[in-house]
Image (cartoon, rainbow, N blue to C red):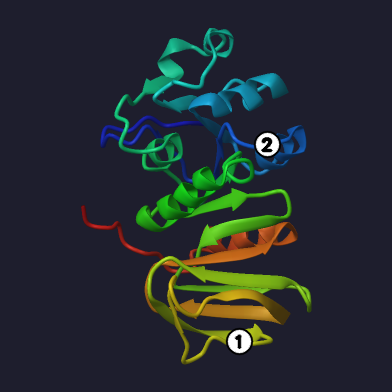
Amino acid sequence: MVNLVESGVIVQAEVPIGLFGGGEITSEDVSLVLKRVKSAVAADGGAAALIDSGRIPDAVIGDFDSLSSGHRAQIPADRLHPISEQNSTDFDKALRNVIAPVVLAAGFLGARVDHQLVAFNTLVRLQDRPCILLGAREIVFHAPPQIRLELNAGDTVSLFPLRRVTGRSDGLEWPINDLVLEPDGRVGTSNRALGALALEVDAPGLLAILPRTALDQVMQAFLSGQTGHWPARAG
């Protein structure tokens, strides 16, 4: 169930939360997420995909500029949480107002490139909110301090820095040990897993991009509490 909390956070759960956006999203995406969560939150127009699937969102967060009147009329008023400020996206508004061990988000990749870029920016800025973005073929998440996964040999592992970071890896064809990764310098795209992967990162700012088939493993890694966590960013 969804718990409303007094701290200003709108939704809090001790299990994964599903978050739905208004970008590219299929009925299969909706079903995949709903099978793995109990609470379903929509970022503004993302409520449409949920309602069309037969699920009324537990909460809808955003400025409501893309939520149709027809869909809005089907949502109980106490589940609508308008945030009118225009300095952030609906993804940002929603993610900063939910607390869960991990958020599984669909409908934020694909379609417009600028929307994808700002979603990646949000993952790094809200570094204390573990979130996995579900794409058509990949998943994207902000790499935690450490993570261990059992991947298939040959799986593509891309590491893209949005800030200057260093780290270590075991199980990559091209290890990142002793490398400095930065957005205007060396990046780590199109690496390959040798099998089991262990990744450690010295600071926040690195995006990990893995095959969609790794979703359940990544979710379990966050749920196990063995990944460590980045603190809330000041300001």
Q: How far apart are marks 1 and 2 (CA)?
A: 34 Å
| Label 1 residue SS | strand
**Looking at the image, do the residues carrying marks 1 and 2 touch, with CB atoms under 8 Å apart?**
no
Disc 1 crowd, CA 10 A, few/some/many (<14, 14-19, 20+): some
* Residue pointed to by mark 1: 170
Q: Which of marks 1 and 2 is in front?
A: 2
| Label 2 residue SS | loop
In the displayed structure image, the side of residue 200 where residue 18 appears, left or right: right
Instruction: Out of 234 and 120, give the one closest to the viewer.
Output: 120
Instruction: Indicate the amino acid at tag 1.
Output: Asp
Quarter assignment of residue 79: top left
Q: Which residue is drawn at 73% across and 54% down?
A: 137
Residue 234, above or below 90: below
Q: Which residue is drawn at 38% across and 69% down?
A: 163
Instruction: Indicate the amino acid at tag 2.
Output: Ile
Residue 125, above or below 155: above
Residue 77, above or below 99: above
Q: Which residue is drawn at 49% across and 79% down?
A: 200
Q: Where is residue 141 in the image (x, y as percent from the top left)?
A: 54, 59
- Check residue 193 in the rendering and tell me which mark sits there, or answer none: none
Q: Position of residue 128 (x, y in %)?
A: 37, 56
Instruction: Out of 73 and 24, give the one closest to the viewer.
Output: 24
The single residue placed furthest to the left in the displayed view is 235
Instruction: Out of 149 and 204, give the one closest to the viewer.
Output: 204
Q: Which residue is drawn at 43% across and 68% down?
A: 228
* Residue pointed to by mark 2: 25
Q: Can residue 157 be seen in this view?
A: yes
Upstream in the sequence, badge 1 or badge 2?
2
Q: Position of residue 77 (x, y in %)?
A: 43, 11
Disc 2 crowd, CA 10 A, few/some/many (<14, 14-19, 20+): many
